[in-house]
Image (cartoon, rainbow, N blue to C red):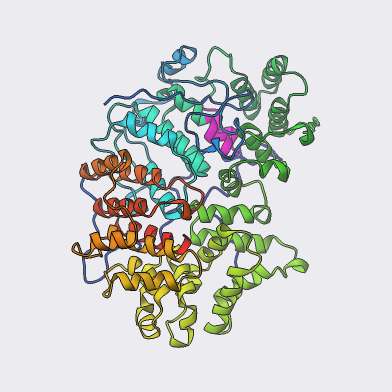
Amino acid sequence: MARKPISYGLWASACVAIALALPAVGQDRPESILPPGFGDAPEPAPRRTEPAPASRTQAPARPGPSAPTSGRPAEGAGAAASAPADLLTTDAQLTSTDPALEEAASLAALSDIPAQARRSANRVGLLGARDGDMGVGAYQGVNGQYLARVMRRLDAPIASRWGAIVLRRALLSRAQTPANVSSADWAAERAWLLVRMGEAVSARDLVQAVDVDQFSPALYAFGMQASLASADPAALCPMVAGADRANRDTAWTLARAMCSAFSGEGSLATAQLDRARSRRGDNDVDVLLAEKVVGAAQDARRSVTINWDDIRTLNVWRYGLATATGLQIPDRLMQSVDVRVQAWRAQAPLLSYTQRLPDAERAAAMGVFSSAALVDFYGAAFAEQDPADQGNPVFDLLRDSYVGADEEARVEAMSRLWQFESNDEWQSYARRIVTARAAARIRPSADLADQAPALIMSMLAAGLDRHAVRWLPIIADAGDDVSWGYLAVASPRPISGITASRISDFGKASDDNGDLRAQMLFAGLAGLGRVSPSSLPGMAESFDVALTKRTAWTDALERAVRLRAPGAVAVLCAAGLQANRWSDIPPEHLYHIVSALRRVGLEPEARMIAAEAIARA
């Protein structure tokens, strides 16, 4: 496999010398996770069109901008359950009216930005129409403070890869800022949620899409989080002039030192380091990491040794600066943090592809990397190896999956790859993602009918629904209930024969969790409107799925649907997918999520979420 560039910021930067390769600016347009043509209506039906544009609450405290100070977790932060308390937070819990940053919030317009070059903060985003942008009215009619609070409390990453892809599109769309929230604070909340989802590079790029003279205290805070999560301390430099102008935050003092070094002002950088050291002590690891960045930026021959044995917790400051300078973080620290950090590391350009390959697999399963990007990543990792050591079975099996001697050999290679030393469900799912296009190249054949469920699951993991439905005649002849269940929800057009007994047969034919998977299949079909209304109540009772149960969440989701606000629907759907695995998601949640997405014009994405649910439950 040829070595290709990876889309999520695997690039070198020329902003510092020798040992420090740091991206200073974001990419113009992030990679689309969706496969080409995904969501286009089947012929002869016309293409799907975008949906028409369509109580005051107290905003929770905002976490501070740095990690060198000890802290407590933010309210509802996704890291609270499984990551150290200070992984993404600090002791400076800020709000937009925090007196410590009043002066920064009212920073005068920067003289070096001419009027014609200024950008409005009311419609900040990174996507274009071809990348899945949800339109200017993605949040129309929605109370911005309410939605921001939902986003703040959302425990990310979520169980669904496809749910995360839809949420990412909503957060990166060039939509109008909703009511009752400032544009800068709205950008800050979006960036903060992207960081927690593992989308560190996208979060940094979103922050950079706002002119710094329009920053709020929250955007300064979350801008630092995004810069560190993306291992890009150079991205802090546009912010240092306005953030913490009273010079009370050690983290911003250290940021100024690093930025002074990037600008070639070595003496000033040293003075700023000394100021921070006087507050924290000579051997403080956070100061030492900043000093290492300063030394790398200046190509100075100062020796800075980081003793990881004395470090018990890994926070975003330590992760970001260590990764930016190419330091290897011990496994014991990486294993103590949330899985989102693996997605961050998968996008870190200074680390080798081989070192990051397990992280890239997790990132793909989380929805951060596309199938094509993961294939490229494997190819780059293969090319990075010494020719004498290029006998890794995983690389060999992936190559044979695409270029095997015949279709039977390719299917056999895929089957072995899916099972080869798979440590958990996430890695197994990632390997189905990476073989999706190989599976799509297999011609439907009765000789391969036994492999149809696995091939279809692989194709649907990457959204290749049109290729998957080609197997319908084969599975009909073979009486394949499992493949039928996948295609019953994934097919662009409804298929016949949807009955309670057929759904039950799908559950019985499933390898494990058959009852739950049957419930998920019924919920997905009901949400897609593929169960007749007359049969719906009886089937809901038969499968014990409470379709009519109302909660505050379902009511909010219905309101967003009535407002035709797909961005708000995406956020609320993600709130219903907060779990580590699909088996923890109630089937009725799947019903409401699929139904809501379908009714706001996101029916293809709804189908993929339903297919993922029954495949991974």
User: Which stretch did the figure color magenta?
Assistant: 224-239
Q: In the displayed structure, would residue 366 be above or below residue 188?
A: below
Q: Residue at x 69, y 40 (%)?
A: 333
Q: Residue at x 27, y 75 (%)?
A: 497
Front residue of 380 and 473: 473
Residue 325, position in %: x, y? Answer: 69, 39
| Furthest residue toward left | 534
Q: In the displayed structure, would residue 346 be above or below residue 237?
A: below
Residue 595, position in %: x, y? Answer: 28, 54
Query: On the image, which quarter does residue 608 sit in?
Result: bottom left
Q: Is residue 532 magenta?
A: no
Q: Quadrant of the N terminus?
A: bottom right
| Magenta residues, dominant SS class | helix
Residue 597, position in %: x, y? Answer: 30, 52
Is 545 left, or right, of 10 in this rendering? left
Is 384 left, or right, of 139 in this rendering? right
Front residue of 449 and 215: 449
Front residue of 608 and 480: 480
Q: Is residue 139 visible?
A: yes
Residue 570, position in %: x, y? Answer: 35, 46
Q: Is residue 126 visible?
A: no
Q: Is residue 227 magenta?
A: yes
Q: Residue at x 44, y 81 (%)?
A: 443
Q: How many marks?
A: 0
Front residue of 512 and 43: 512
Q: In the displayed structure, would residue 456 be above or below residue 283?
A: below
